[in-house]
Image (spheres, helix red, strand yellow):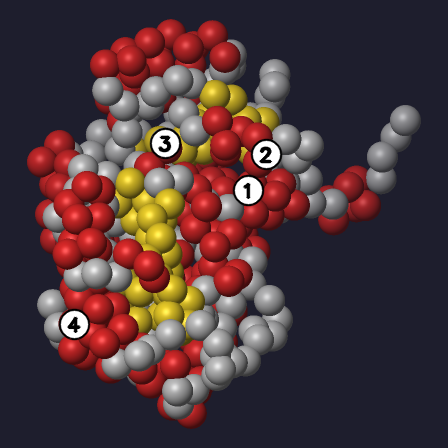
Amino acid sequence: MVTNGADGADKQPAPLIPHVLHVVDRDAFARFGCMFRQLGLALSAAEVRVSLLTDEPAAVAELEATPVEARHFPALSGWSAWRLLSFLRRQFSPPPDVVHTWSTAALGQLSDWTLAADRPLLVHVSTRRDLERFKRRGIRSNERLLAACRHYAERLRERWPASAESITVSRPALLVPEQAPELNVRDRTLGLLWTGVLDDRSGLEVLIEAVARLRSMNCDLQLVLIGQGPATRDIWQEVRRRRVQDCVSLIAKSGLWDQALAGADVYVVPACQHDLALGPLMAMGLGKVVVSSRDQPAEWFIEDQTTLQFTPGSAVELAYHITRTAAGHPNVRAVTRAAAQYVRENHAVTVLAGELATLYRETLASKPAASRAAPGAQQ
């Protein structure tokens, strides 16, 4: 068949479909939850073939009957992770075009594998632990860093000025309703929610003190704590010491926080959240009140626009914001409306998927021609 040269010149080649492996450890899944399912679907719609590797069985279950190919490995950190390299070689032949890991768990194995296979490795920095590790370790030739907030990107750029242009801010994202429901808490029990790791950095002592103050003022409330950690026993002893165990519930299953948000009125971040999480953003997007300490690294904590903020360590100020919420103060309702709009405009999962799809293709296009295979080939 003869093709008209003029007609053929006008045709643009179809965009290549890269195969991207997302690596999500149990900790990242606990912090970002449903984001990975939503992002996987959005990336698939953006012509990216997505696989996911995780040590969290619930993440695999969530991706059943979706275009995302989810695979389970028992442990991405600790002594059991030594078998990961051989697992990757067996499961992915040929290797994916791009590997995108959402933490520094198993970074050594992933880096060795991608370097040997001549594949780019994108590493998402979303915790202070990840940040400090890269400040000590350095960046290998096939690696590119993504920072989950502007503050972490600035710290990485200061440490690695030669790589500053390649360090990208890529914020958490989610699906949010077009119209968040109006705050309505009058004449019913006020629901407070905290999620995270129960340790000495959680700020739960401040939150429990604030709850005790509110109870002494006859404020009708219920606090739900979702998470686990080394300070679990100490936290519950503090709850009993303050005599508020009748209005505090502790659920030691980190993956339930997104479901619990539906019944909450207030999401509390009582201390600096060094390990970024989707919870506050989801709460904002759903029209909930977010009350946080005033020392957050993430730029989406904006005082009197997306959150009500208090001086770190001040249970009195924290309690004050909760009483304003319980009273249905007009200013509090205005903040919830502004916060929901902010999330819709800045954290839409479809926008993140489009940005990542472009980044994956640009990363592949920037590889030297001699080492660049056609994305999707032989897969």
Picture quadrant where residue 350 is located: bottom right
Viewer-closest of 360 and 248: 248
The reply to whether dot 2 and dot 1 touch (C-beta < 8 Å) is yes
Q: Earlier in the sequence, mark 2 or mark 1?
A: 1
Residue behind mark 1? 37
Task: Report the residue marked by disc 3.
Answer: 25
Of callouts 4 and 1, which one flags the residue occurring earlier in the amino acid sequence? 1
Q: Quadrant of residue 321?
A: bottom left
Circle nearer the viewer, 4 or 1: 4
Q: Is residue 205 visible?
A: yes
Which amino acid does the dot numbered 4 rest on?
Ala
Q: Nearer the viewer, mark 4 or mark 3?
A: 4
Relative to 233, is 377 above or below? above
Discs 4/2, front: 4
Specify whether 270 is left or right of 64: left
280 relative to 357 in the view: left or right: left
Q: Are marks 4 and 1 in contact (CB under 8 Å)?
A: no
Task: Please state the horizontal and vertical placement of residue 237, each as a whole percent of the image.
Answer: 17, 48
